[in-house]
Amino acid sequence: MAQEILSWMERAQTPEAAFELLIDVGLWSPHENLFLRRSGYPIQFSKKVLEVAQKLP
């Protein structure tokens, strides 16, 4: 599906082009941590977790 989208948008069908597309549409930043994304660790936390973290010394 990704290759079809890249082709439809007249972009190269490469991982680099896919990365650039995600930046261009605002889903990722140019400095996106791909290792963190691939790891499956959460990158967003609930309000409760953030509140508890703020109270830590």
Image (tube, rainbow, N blue to C red):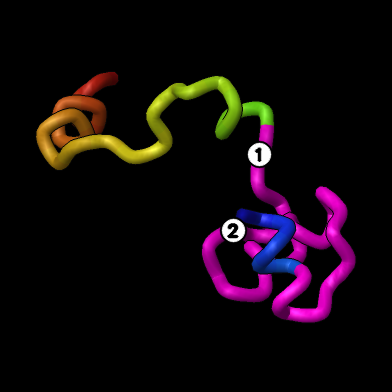
Front in this rendered view, residue 53 or 45: 45
**Decide: marks 2, 1 in contact (CB < 8 A)?**
no
**Residue 36 on the magenta span:** no
Residue at 71% x, 52% y is: 31
Residue at 84% x, 59% y is: 13
Q: Quadrant of residue 43?
A: top left
- The image position of residue 22, as x and y in percent, is 64, 63
Identify residue type, mark 1. Asn
Identify residue type, mark 2. Trp
Answer above or below: position of 47 versus 6.
Answer: above
Question: Of callouts 2 and 1, which one flags the residue occurring earlier in the amino acid sequence?
Answer: 2
Answer above or below: position of 36 versus 33.
Answer: above
- The image position of residue 18, as x and y in percent, is 74, 58
Residue at 55% x, 71% y is: 26
**Residue 12 on the magenta span:** yes
Answer above or below: position of 27 versus 16.
Answer: below
Q: How many marks?
A: 2
Of the 4 image quadrants, the one containing the C terminus is top left
Name the mark on residue 55.
none
The crowd level at tag 2 (other Cα within 10 Å; few <14, some 14-19, many 20+) is some
Residue indicated by mark 2: 28
- The image position of residue 34, as x and y in percent, is 67, 36
Q: CA distance from mark 2 to mark 1?
A: 9 Å
Residue indicated by mark 1: 33
